[in-house]
Amino acid sequence: MRKTKLLNIGKILLHGAALLIVYVLQAAMFPRLAILGVKPLLLPVIVVCIAMHEGPVRGALVGLAAGILCDVSLNEPAVLFTLLLTGVGLGAGYLAETFLVRGFLSCLLTVLAALLLCTAVQMLQIMVAGGIHISRVWAPGLVQVLYSLLFVIPMYLLSKLINLIAGTQPE
Amino acid sequence: MKGILKKRGLLIVAAAVVVALISLVAINVTGGHTDGFSGPIKVVTQPFESVMTAMVRSLERVYGYIYEYDRVVNENAELREKVARLEKEYREYSEISQENERLRALLGLSQRSEYQYETAAVISWSASTWSSSFTIGKGTSSGLKLGDCVVTETGYVVGKITEITAANATVTTILDSSSSVSAAIYKTGATAVAQGDFELMRQGLLALRYLSDETDFVRGDTIVTSGKGGVYPRGLVIGYVEDVTYSASGIDLQASVRPAAEMEDLLYVFVITGFDAAD
C-alpha cells in the first residue's frame, strides 16, 4: 500500500518534470529552430502520450497543467490551451481505455487528431481576430502539424520510460 | 471506468473551467495586464527559460565558430570599410552639430529632449507560429507600462509592450500581424503605415501600406517612424525597403520592409518610458 503510494507520488513528480522539460523546449529552444517560419507545438504531444498510458483522469490533470504552461509559452492572454489540453488529455485517456489498443500507432493517430484540433483552433483565432483568409493560413498550419508530429517518437518513449520506472498501473 | 469519469472527469473539467473563468476575469479587470494568472507562472518558469535560452545561444556560438568563419571574415572586412566611412561622416556630423548648437543659441531655441530609457533583458520568445512577441525581464516595478515603445541599443524599432506584470512584460514586435506603426519614407517624408503581415512575418518582413501613387521610393530606402499616434517618437528607424509591389487587387502600391532591428539576435532591448511627443 505504502509502496504504491510512493510510486504514485514518484510518477506525479516524473510527469511534472517531463512537462517542465517539454515546456522549456517549446518556450526557449524551438522558437529559434523554426522551419519555414513555423514552430512546433510540443505540449499537446506529451499530453496525449501520457494520457494514453495513464487514462482519462490523470490525462486531464496533465492536460490542465500543460495547458496553463502552453498559454504562457505562446504568450496567449486567453486561456485557450488550458481548456483545450484538458479536453485533449481527457479524450485521449478515454479513447485509450475504451476504443484503442494501447500502442505506438494509436498514440500517433491520437496525437495527429490533437494537433489538428489545436492548430485548427489557432488558425480560427487568427482568421477571426486578424481577418485573414483561410488560404493564407492552411499551409503554415499543415507544416506546424507535421513538424510537431516528429516529436511523437521521443515523447512516446519518454512516457513509456516513466511507466517503466514508476509502474504501469493507471489511476 | 465510467463511474470514475463521471465523478472525477467532470470535476477536472469543472476545475479547468473555473481556472479559465478566473483568469479571463483577471485579464479583463486588469485591462490586458496578466498579473492575475500567468504572472506567477512566469515567475516560476522564467529561470528555466533563461537557462535554456543561454544554452541555446552558447550552442549557436559554437556552430558559428565552426561553420561561419568565412562569412565572418568577409563581414569583418565590410564592417571595417563601414567604420571608416562612418568615422568620416561623424566628423562632418560633429561640425554640423556644433554649428546647429551655435545657431540654436542665436535663435534662443531649446535643445531636443532626450528619451527616457529602461534596459531589459530578453527572456524568451513566443513559441507561437501565429504571432511575433517575446518576454522581457522587467515590468511595472521598473516603471514600464502598457504601450511603451521598445527599441534596440541603436534606436531601431522593435515593437511595443502589449502585456505587463510587475516583474516582466510581453513585447509584440512590429512583425506581428496586429502591429501597425505610423511611418514615413526618410528620403522624401512621404507618410505611410508599416503593418505586420502574417505571410511576411514568417520571412522576417513587414508591409508598408497606404502609400500614394506618386510616392517615390526604391529598394533600400530607409523607413522611419512619423511620430503620429504618440506611441513611437518621430524619426526612429523601422527598416529598409526590400521590395516594391502592388496589393493583391493590383491597385494599391505597397512595399515589403526588412526591419533594421535584428529580431532573432536581441539580447537586450531599451524601453522608451518617456519622450516629448513633439520629437
Image (cartoon, coloured by chain):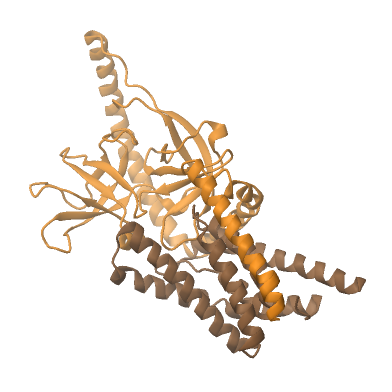
- Give the residue drawn at x 54%, y 84%: A109
Q: x%, y% of residue B166?
A: 57, 38
Q: Could you tell me which residue is drawn at 70 percent across and 70 percent down?
A: B8
Residue A70 is at least partly visible in this image = yes
Q: Residue at x 21, y 39 (%)?
A: B186
A26, above or below A102, in the image:
above
The answer to whether residue B269 is left or right of residue A50 is left
The colour with which the image depicts chain A is brown
Q: Is residue B215 above or below residue A83?
A: above
Residue B191 percent coordinates (x, y) = 18, 41
Apparent side of residue B217 relative to residue B179 in the rendered image (left or right):
left
Quarter containing the N terminus of chain A:
bottom right
Instruction: Tell me, yes or no, if residue B61 can be seen here.
Output: no
Q: Which chain is orange?
A: B
- Residue A162 in the image, given as x and y percentages of width and height: 74, 75
Which quadrant: the C terminus of chain A? bottom right
Residue A26, located in which quarter of the rendered image? bottom right
Query: Is B220 located above or below residue B64 in the figure?
Result: above
